[in-house]
Image: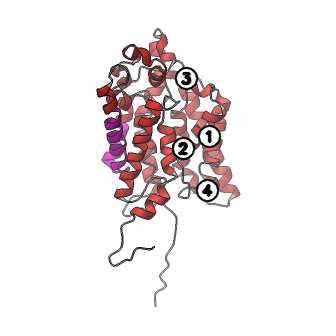
Amino acid sequence: MTNNRFILKSSPHFKGKDSVPKIMYAVILSLIPAIAASFYFFRMRALLIYLLSVSVCLITEAVFLKARKKPMHSLWDGSAIITGLLLAMTLPPSLSLDIVVIGAVVSITLGKHVFGGLGDNIFNPALVGRAFLQVAFPVAMTTWIPPVTNQINTATYATPLGNLKFQTAAIQGALTPLKDLFWGNIGGCLGETSAVALLLGAAFLLYKRAIDWRIPVGIISILTVFTGVFWLTGPDKYASPAFHILAGGLIIGAFFMATDMVTSPISPLGTWIYALGIGLLIGIIRLFGGFPEGVMFSILFMNTFVPLINRYTRPRILGERSTP
């Protein structure tokens, strides 16, 4: 008689040749164009923030692996590196380095290990760290500097969405040109300014099938429809859907954060519900909320519903009876 052993482990689950490290390092490779763009636009500030964020995330990860008596080789599965990179990409280039350290520690501690580590966390760790910094250091997190390539234009001291939110009386003059949004010659967080760099990385992820295409398509589609309705009825008051897609953290959020394999639904129907919810919330916050940006809040909010979405959208096994 053979002794068959079955090992039960938490998500993420894979079939085939893929593994967690393989997927993680594919995401890291996909971030290289956006990281390079941030080096170009923000120079040494970008380099310091990236190095510090990744280093502190790795150190914090090692401390928790040691304390929890977990194998140390998990340190190099890529998850802590991605958390450090994504956190840095969502931070202002002017941010004090000690605040970067706090954000990295919070990302790994409260965003990951407090739930049990990779596979058990219900929120995107990088966004948990970013949300903490947004609440704890609101002034520092909304203080912007222009890229070194655009020092003359003082309007870049505010982000494009900030200009839109607080200058709606002169909407046409407040809008940042789409060309600048596309290439990244604007003020904003390190990794979200250059849409073309992010789209190059997103194309790589889609090609490698490292993310579920339904999530970015659903987010962008509902945001386009929602903002498009208001733009068509009041173009002098509301920005176009193209502006909302290229500005702020929409692209990095839709392709690199909302698609996190641990914190997103597992069924196709659940994925559509999740994505449409994120896109709708982003539109509502941007148009009617008190904050110029809504990507972070929307993803974290929908992360909380993923277990419920998974429960009610799980494909039923043939012959299975529904539970009351």
Residue 119 sits above or below residue 187 on the image: below
Q: Which x, y percent locates residue 44? A: 55, 23
Q: Nearer the viewer, residue 282 or 95?
A: 282
Tally the marks: 4
For disc 4, the marked residue is: 115
For disc 2, the marked residue is: 83
> Could you tell whether 126 is left or right of 226 in the image?
right
Q: Which x, y percent locates residue 10? A: 52, 64
Q: Which mark is residue 228?
A: none
Q: Which quarter of the figure has residue 105?
A: top right
For disc 1, the marked residue is: 104
Q: Earlier in the sequence, mark 2 or mark 4?
A: 2
Q: Report if residue 316 is visible in the image.
A: yes
Residue extending furthest toward the top: 152
Q: Which x, y percent locates residue 175? A: 39, 18
Do labels 2 and 4 touch, CB within 8 Å? no
Residue extending furthest toward the left: 232
| Cα distance in 3D space between marks 4 and 1 | 16 Å
Q: Earlier in the sequence, mark 3 or mark 2?
A: 3
| Cα distance in 3D space between marks 4 and 3 | 35 Å
Q: Which mark is residue 44?
A: 3
